[in-house]
Image: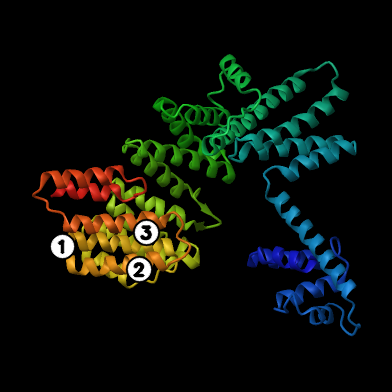
Amino acid sequence: MNSVKIIQTLDTLGKVEKSRFLRFLQSPYFNQRQDVLNLYLAIQEGVRSDDKEQLYARACPGAPYEPQKLRLLMSYLQKLADQFLAVEQWQATPGAQESELVQAYRQKGLERHFQDALHLAKQHLAQQPLRNSGYYMRQGILLWEEARYASLRHPHDESALLALSDNADLLWLSQKLRYLCLHTAYTARFRTTRHLRLREEVESVLQQADYSAVPAISTWFYCLKMLESPESAGYFAQFKQQFLAQSQAFDPDELRDLYLFAVNYCIRRVNEGQTVFFHDIMDFYKEGLMQGHLLDKGVLSHFTYYNIVAAGLHTREYEWVENFIQRYRNALERSYRDSAFSFNRARLEFARKRYDDALALLQNANYHDPVLNMAAKTMSLKIYYALGEYEVLHAHLEAFVIYIRRKPGLGYHRNNYLNLARYTQKLIALNWNDKAEVSAMRQKIENEAVLTEREWLLEQFVRS
C-alpha cells in the first residue's frame, strides 16, 4: 500500500517539482536519511515499483533484502513528500510566510522585529490583487496580532479590536455567500429541499450596510440572487458587470466556480429559447481566455474547447472561432488534441456551408471516443442530406445504425441516434407535396421524447 501511494504521489509531480523535491530530500534540515534519498532516485530512474528487491538494493546497497524495511522507507518517503507539498503550498499562498513571521516575532517578544514584519506583511498583502475571503482571512491574522500587541502597549485603545471585528464581518459574509451559491446550485441540480442556516440573516445584514465596493461580497451576492431567481435578468446583469470588472479579486478555484455558474445560467436561458444569451456566454469565454482563467496550468479542457466553439458558432463569429481553434490547439490535453482540433474545424466549415472541406476533415480523422465518433457521423449525415447525396446517405445511414447496435457503452445516446437515423430516413422518403403527411411527420418529430437533433430535423421543413 505504501509503495502504491508514494508512486501515485510522485506521478503527479511535474518536472520542476521533481527537481525541487530532490533538493528538498538532499537538505539535512528536512531529511538525514541517505537510504530514503537513494530510494527516490531509483524510482525516478525507472526502477519499477513492483521490483521490490531491486528498489531495496538501490536504497540500501550491499544489504540483504528486508521487505519490512522497504515498506518503512516507502512510508518515510511518503511523509517527506507530504511535507514537501505542504511547504510548496505554504510558499505559494499570498501572505502566508509574512503573517506567520509576525506571529513568531510577537511570541518571542522582539518588538522592533515585530513592527517591521507587521509593516512588510501589511504592505505585501495590500499589493497583491486578491480581495477574496482568503485576503480577509490573512488580514484577520495580522489584525489579531496587532490587537494582541496593542492590548499590552495601549490597553485603552480599541481601534485594533474594531478593525478586527469589521474584518471578521467581511470574512464571514464572503465565505457564507460563496457557500450559499454552491448549495443553491447543488439543490437545483439534485432537486434537494434542505436549506442552509442564516440565509435570511445574510440578506438582512446586506440591507443594513453598503458592501457594493467589496468584490468578494457584491459579486457572490448577485451570483446568489441570479441562481435563486434565474427568471430575473436584472440580477444576472448585475452579476455579470461585477464579475467581469472584478475578476482579478478572486483565486483560480473561485473563478472556475463563478464562470461555471455564469455559463450554466446562460445555457439554461438559451434552452428556454432566449438565444441572446449566447452572446453573454461568449463574453464570459472571451474574458476568461484573455485573463487565463479558463486554463489550468496552461492546459485548456477539451470540454471547454468544444463549448467555446459551439457558442461562437451560434453567434456566427466564424473568424474569431477559426482563430480560437488554431490558437488553443496546443493548449489541449495531448490525448485529445488532434481529434478535438479536426472535429471543431469540421464544425466550423459545416457552419460556413463549406461541406467538402468539412467532410475531408471528418474522413481524415480517427475518433476513438464513441460519442465523438457518433457526433462526426451525425455531421456527415447532415452534409449528405444538405448536398442531396441520397444514395451515399442511404449507405451512411445503414452503416450508422449497424455501428450503434454493435457499439457498447453508448448509454442513453443509443436511442437518440437511432431516432435520428429513423427520422432522417423518413425525411428522404417523405412526399413533400402531401401537406397532411408532412404535417404528421413534423408533429411526430416535435413529440419525440429523445431527440437532440430535433432542431435540425425541423429546419428541413422550413427549407422545403
Q: Going by the image, does 190 lie left or right of 431?
A: right
Q: From the image, tell me which residue sits under label 1.
A: 388
The answer to which of 321 and 65 lies nearer the viewer is 65
Residue 99, given in percent of the width and then of the height, sits at: 76, 40
Q: Residue at the spot x=65%, y=22% of the render?
A: 198
Q: Hey, which quadrant is residue 396 in on the image?
A: bottom left
Element under disc 2? helix
Q: Considering only order in the chain, which callout, 3 or 2, is on the residue closer to the N terminus?
A: 3
At label 3, the amino acid type is Ile
Q: Considering only order in the chain, which callout, 3 or 1, is on the residue closer to the N terminus?
A: 3
Q: Is residue 354 visible?
A: no
The answer to which of 152 and 366 lies nearer the viewer is 366
Q: Residue at the spot x=61%, y=27% of the render?
A: 195
Element under disc 1? loop
At label 1, the amino acid type is Gly
Q: Residue at the spot x=18%, y=69% of the render?
A: 391
Q: From the image, tell me which residue sits under label 2.
A: 402
Q: From the image, tell me which residue sits under label 3.
A: 325
Q: Nearer the observer, disc 1 or disc 3?
A: 1
Residue 312, given in percent of the width and then of the height, sits at: 33, 49
Residue 289, given in percent of the width and then of the height, sits at: 44, 49
- Mark 1–mark 3 distance (CA, rounded to whole Å): 29 Å
Q: Hey, which quadrant is residue 319 in on the image?
A: bottom left
